[in-house]
């Protein structure tokens, strides 16, 4: 995904939530990075993964958070996975697997992990789906 799309998506989410992204990658140790993040409180983070034309395995972006959280039991994460309607994982078995993994991680990790899927307009102008669920998730943190 082009950096500009990550920035555009982060801006849309920031506008919807009133929160500000760091503009930097979030290091997940040996497991990779998330595209951007917000520190909500100490040891509480909202991580952003933007799934664009180049991402063919969106489930990996969900799965890589699990070993990070296993190694950091004091940390809790809300993972926002943003798709565009034309993203390869938007309506595929691999995209569905990512959503399923997110649900399984929620069940296994309890309050330490929340997964929210957003759909972004192709021109990055607005969030088409999922913002209400994200706002509810953020509300329960406070």
Image (tube, rainbow, N blue to C red):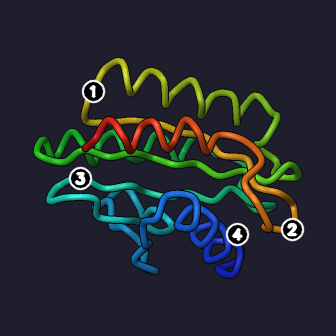
Residue bearing mark 4: 1
Give the CA distance from mark 3 to mark 2: 30 Å
Within 10 angstroms of label 3, few (less than 14), some, or many (20 or more) residues?
some
Residue bearing mark 2: 123
Q: Check whether the beta carbons of the residues at disc 1 and disc 4 lie within 8 A of each other.
A: no
Residue 104 shown left or right of residue 29 in the figure: right
Front disc: 2 or 1: 2
Give the CA distance from mark 3 to mark 4: 25 Å
- Residue 44 numbered tag: 3
Residue that lies at the very extreme toward the left in this rendered image: 74
> Would you identify the image quadrant in which residue 132 lies?
top right
Identify which residue, 130 or 94, lies in the foreground: 130
Query: Going from the N terminus, do you reach mark 2 or mark 1 first?
Result: 1
User: At 17% across and 45% down in the image, what residue appears?
Assistant: 71
Residue 37 in percent (x, y) is at 41, 65
Residue 49 in percent (x, y) is at 55, 57
Query: Going from the N terminus, do you reach mark 1 or mark 3 first?
Result: 3
Residue 76 in percent (x, y) is at 24, 44
Is 132 drawn above or below residue 46 in the view shown?
Answer: above
Q: Where does the C terminus fall, quadrant-wise? A: top left
Q: Secondary structure at mark 1?
A: helix
Identify which residue, 114 or 29, lies in the foreground: 114
Identify which residue, 57 or 73, lies in the foreground: 73
Q: Check whether the beta carbons of the residues at disc 4 and disc 2 lie within 8 A of each other.
A: no
Residue 88 shown left or right of residue 34 in the figure: right
Q: Secondary structure at mark 4?
A: loop
Residue 104 shown left or right of residue 69 in the figure: right
Query: Going from the N terminus, do you reach mark 3 or mark 2 first?
Result: 3
Residue bearing mark 1: 109
Q: Secondary structure at mark 2?
A: loop
Give the CA distance from mark 4 to mark 2: 14 Å
Give the CA distance from mark 2 to mark 1: 35 Å
């Amino acid at each position: 995904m082009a950096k500009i799309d990550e920035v555009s998506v982060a801006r849309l989410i920031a506008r919807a939530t009133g929160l500000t992204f760091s503009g930097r990658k979030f290091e997940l140790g040996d497991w990779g990075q998330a595209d951007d993040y917000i520190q909500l409180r100490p040891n509480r983070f909202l991580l952003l993964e933007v799934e664009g034309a180049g991402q063919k395995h969106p489930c990996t972006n969900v799965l890589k958070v699990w070993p990070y959280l296993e190694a950091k039991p004091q940390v809790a994460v809300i993972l926002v996975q943003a798709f565009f309607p034309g993203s390869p994982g938007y309506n595929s078995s691999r995209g569905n697997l990512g959503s399923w993994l997110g649900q399984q991680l929620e069940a296994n990790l309890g309050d330490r992990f929340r997964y929210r899927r957003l759909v972004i307009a192709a021109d990055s102008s607005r969030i088409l789906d999922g913002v209400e669920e994200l706002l509810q998730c953020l509300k329960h943190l406070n």
